[in-house]
Image (tube, rainbow, N blue to C red):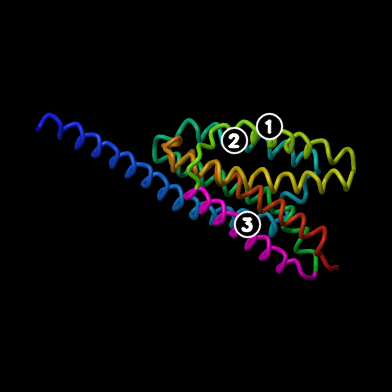
Amino acid sequence: MNDNVQPVYTGYAASSGAVAQRNRVLRNTYWLLALSMVPTVLGAWVGVTTGITASMGVGMSLIVFLGGAFAFMFAIEKTKTSSAGVYVLLAFTFFMGLMLSRLVAQILGFSNGTSLIMTAFGGTAVVFFAMASLATVIKRDLTTMGKFLFVGALIVFVGFIVSPFLQSSALMLTLLVLCLGVFSAFILYNVKRVIDGGETNYITATLAIYLSIYNVFQSLLMLLGIFGGED
């Protein structure tokens, strides 16, 4: 009898340990994600106050953004298993806030700019909580979804690079809506990965979800500025 009971008990303990590990990763991810918003806001405030990004041309801003973003993500990947990874991630979110300040400053140029920013913030929060909640109730494996989302993100990325040269309002609106949809789905996908145990490093998980939230907020803010900005 003991021989029959032991494997069952061992399997149950292993299962409980795996669930506890996943919950710990998810909890740490949410805490670090919340903390990452502080340097993002600070970076945006510094950028708006100093005008450092507004003084750059579109081409230079793109070069700085791409170079800085990929350098930081490389550094985060190298330090993700140590406490240094947290500090590198927070430095990255400050940089991203700084890069966002150009758009924030433009929106603040509207008479209802502050309201638009708060609306975009609230809308982003709604999207995040909706996708995160959905991830907890979906039982289906979403692994294959990642391939389609990657293609969608690549299309958006290339589109935003070429759109300034094409000067097409229709293309810009299409890209913003697509970006909003793709990265909202990415939030669902990345949270579900943590819940299912597909991502066990909370720094990497935070980076992935943060980038999705950042793009959702940016897309919402630009759409609100286009359709709701008042001079």
Q: Do labels 2 and 3 touch, CB within 8 Å? A: no
Q: Nearer the viewer, mark 2 or mark 3?
A: 2
- The secondary structure that most of the magenta stretch takes on is helix
Tell which of 84 and 165 is nearer to you: 165
Judge from the rendering whether residue 158 lies leftward or rightward of residue 207; answer left or right: right
Q: Which residue is mark 2?
A: 145
Give the CA distance from mark 2 to mark 3: 22 Å
How far apart marks 2 and 1 lie (CA) works out to 10 Å
Image spot of residue 130 (x, y percent): 56, 56
Q: Position of residue 80 (x, y in %)?
A: 44, 35
Q: Is residue 3 left or right of residue 184?
A: left
Q: Earlier in the sequence, mark 2 or mark 3?
A: 3
Kind of residue sitting beneath label 2: Met
Q: Secondary structure at mark 3?
A: helix
Whole-percent x and y of residue 152? 70, 36
In magenta segment, residue 117:
yes
Residue that carries the numbered disc 1 in the rendered image: 151
Residue named by callout 3: 124
Residue type at tag 3: Thr
Query: Residue shown at 57%/37% (left/top)?
Result: 72
Q: Which residues are magenta?
A: 111-137
